[in-house]
Image (cartoon, coloured by chain):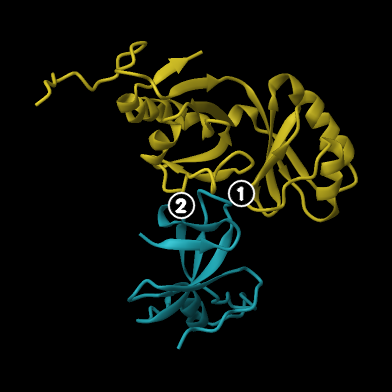
Chain colours: A cyan, B yellow
Amino acid sequence: MLLIPCPYCGERAELEFRYGGEAHFRRPDNHLEASDESWANYLFMRKNPKGWHRERWMHIAGCKRWFYVVRHTVTHRIAAAYKVGDPWPDLPA
Amino acid sequence: MAECAPLDNVIRPGEPNGPSGVALIDRRFIGQVNLRVRGPAVAATGAALGYALPVEANTAVGNGVSRSCWLGPDEWLIVCEDEQRAELMQRLAQALSSHAHAATDVTDARAVLRLAGACARPVLAKGCPLDLHPRRLGPGKVAQSVLARAQIMILPIEEGYDLFVARSFASYVWAWLLDAGAEYGIRVEP
């Protein structure tokens, strides 16, 4: 089980959280004129990296806040957790 | 080898199996107000309550009338006796009239189960992933977590915990605690 450092509550067990998928992708700005390709990209395409991944988590059984986690998808190591609006921490080497 | 009959470990209402180290109490009708404020409204709330709202995560502060539990960076649960609830709501509305705020009476949303006694901690630990040691979760602290997959808010008392559970989960958590406490001779108290 992962020990996830909620930026508000501190370290908590994974089963208190919900996973929210890849973080920091952006809805097409002008949605009426956005191309099918940019919509498809927004709706369906994800990086799915083997390595460091910025992702969204929600502390559903705690403070109920969304935040971001930098997690390694192979080792499950968590390098950072940060609040919405905070500067992005660098990915580890 | 000690003899063990098939039904030795089942719960027998009113008859603790061995010395009882833990009690389960239904704390009926505890007043609960959910408060969402930020900025200067936090201090205004403090003035109305008679103590500053706790802004440190996972802490609870109170006086003889009410106790405010940190739920999130802009959210608190204020707990009081049921008779104090109307006055508390009125007081908050008055103090916060010029601030953006939401004070919601959620008294009926949750049941409050008190788990008290020397063995309250090991019983709770059977279904909760938190570090329950008093240095992490003792009086003055509060935590939201899960107990046997049900969401709960845990408010430690002198020896034991008040567990705030959504009312639809209350009977489930009650039954789970009776089962988990059987080995400690759990007893139900009024």
Distance, label 2 to label 1, CA atoms, is 15 Å
* SS category of the residue bearing label 1: loop
Which quadrant of the view contains residue B90?
top right
Front one among B182 and A2: B182
Badge number at residue B58: 1
Disc 1 packing (10 Å; few <14; some 14–19; many ≥20): many
Residue A61 position within the rendered picture, expressed as x and y whole percent measured from the top left: 50, 48
* SS category of the residue bearing label 2: helix
Quickly name the residue at label 2: A16
Quarter of the image that includes the N terminus of chain A: bottom left
Query: Mark 2 — on which chain does it sit?
Result: A
Quarter of the image that includes the C terminus of chain A: bottom left
Badge 1 amino acid: Asn
Residue B69 position within the rendered picture, expressed as x and y whole percent measured from the top left: 66, 41
Residue in view at x 79 percent, y 31 percent: B89
Residue in view at x 47 percent, y 80 percent: A41
Disc 2 packing (10 Å; few <14; some 14–19; many ≥20): many
Q: Is residue B88 rendered to the left or right of residue A16?
A: right
Query: Mark 1 — on which chain does it sit?
Result: B
Q: Is residue A64 rendered to the left or right of residue A19?
A: right
Which residue is outermost to the front? B1
Front one among B59 and B34: B59
Residue in view at x 65 percent, y 73 percent: A86
Badge number at residue B30: none
| B94 versus A4 height, above or below | above
| B5 versus B98 height, above or below | above
Label pair 2/1, CB-CB below 8 angstroms: no
The residue mark sitting in front, 2 or 1, is 1
